Image (cartoon, helix red, strand yellow):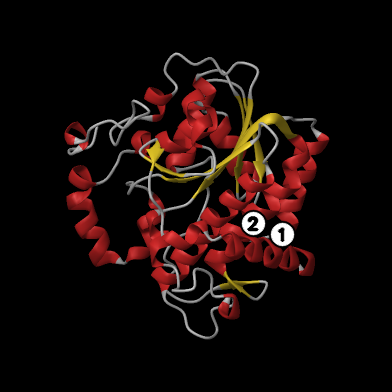
Amino acid sequence: MSFFSMFRSKGPTGYGYGSTAEDVTEGLSLAGKTILVTGCNSGIGQEACRVLSLRGALVLGTARTKEKASAACAKFPGHAIGYACELADPASVRDCVSSIIADGHELDAIICNAGIMMLPKLEKAHGYELQFFTNHIGHFMLVTGLLGQLTDKGRVVMLSSEGHRSSPAQGIDFDNLSGDKGYQPLMAYGQSKMANLLFAKELQRRFTGTDRTAYAVHPGVVDTNLSRNLGPALRRVLAVVAPLFLKTVGEGAATEVFAAVNPKALSLAGHYLADSNVKNSRADADNKTLAAKLWEESELIVKSI
């Protein structure tokens, strides 16, 4: 447990800052459930897969290559199958969707965990800023492609971030999705996380009248390899303060796992969650017009690639 965990009170769900993925699944049997997790080979995605597998779920874990995914899945305590899904490569995402459909998997949950963060210089995929394309468009393709495989009570969990508060003033800068008109690492990352949040909320609206649910979650500030782009000086500082201020991977994986499988999450559908409880997001994350526009623009992007 990280240093400050013991000082954090638990929320209405009975969980809080220091709760782990094992805590939020304690006593649950996930036997017979199939759960897809992107980013299965490192960090909180790896921990989420481990715990879901431990509780009896069939885990479908994705990584950038089949080899990485299969190697990670071989280490989990239960049954897990690895798939390649390079989120910045539309062909890879489409192949992943096709493979899961061909293998006949019905999905009880999709956890969109993988992502990239704070690229120091502008990088692009298919003409779009890489964080937006990877974190949002790749997952948009994956989820919409697999909605036909989602069970009647299936859940979709998008990994957003408190970083969404650093997105542009208009929420999503549709006139600069390429980054060519100006690039700031934190703002670009924030825009991708705002997109994840808006997507989850719009998906929940589209689930109205069904028992399917969607969630956006903030994992907390976690000691993972996402910090690799912060630069050597900041990484040295991080190494010193990490034991005091950062969540462990078990604590970081808790909220996405809670949203995906815990019965207490059902009443929180459509909300932004942190520490396995509802948290207020930036106000424009609830802008239905903005969310609908992002969905429409995302569909156009997917058709163009």
Residue at x 69%, y 49% (from the top left corner):
142
- Which mark identifies residue 109? none
Badge nearest the viewer, 2 or 1: 2
The quadrant holding residue 219 is top left
In the rendered image, the vertical position of residue 275 relative to residue 32, given as above or below: below
The amino acid type, in three-letter code, at marker 2 is: Gly
Q: Which residue is mark 1?
A: 90
Kindly identify which residue carries mark 2.
138
The furthest residue to the right: 102
Can the viewer see residue 210 in this picture? yes
Residue drawn 38% across the image and 28% down it: 13
* Spot occupied by residue 176 in the image (x, y as percentages of width and height): 56, 79
Label 2, secondary structure: give it.
helix
Marks 1 and 2: in contact by CB < 8 Å?
yes
Q: Secondary structure at mark 1?
A: helix
Query: Who is closer to the viewer here, 182 or 238?
Result: 182
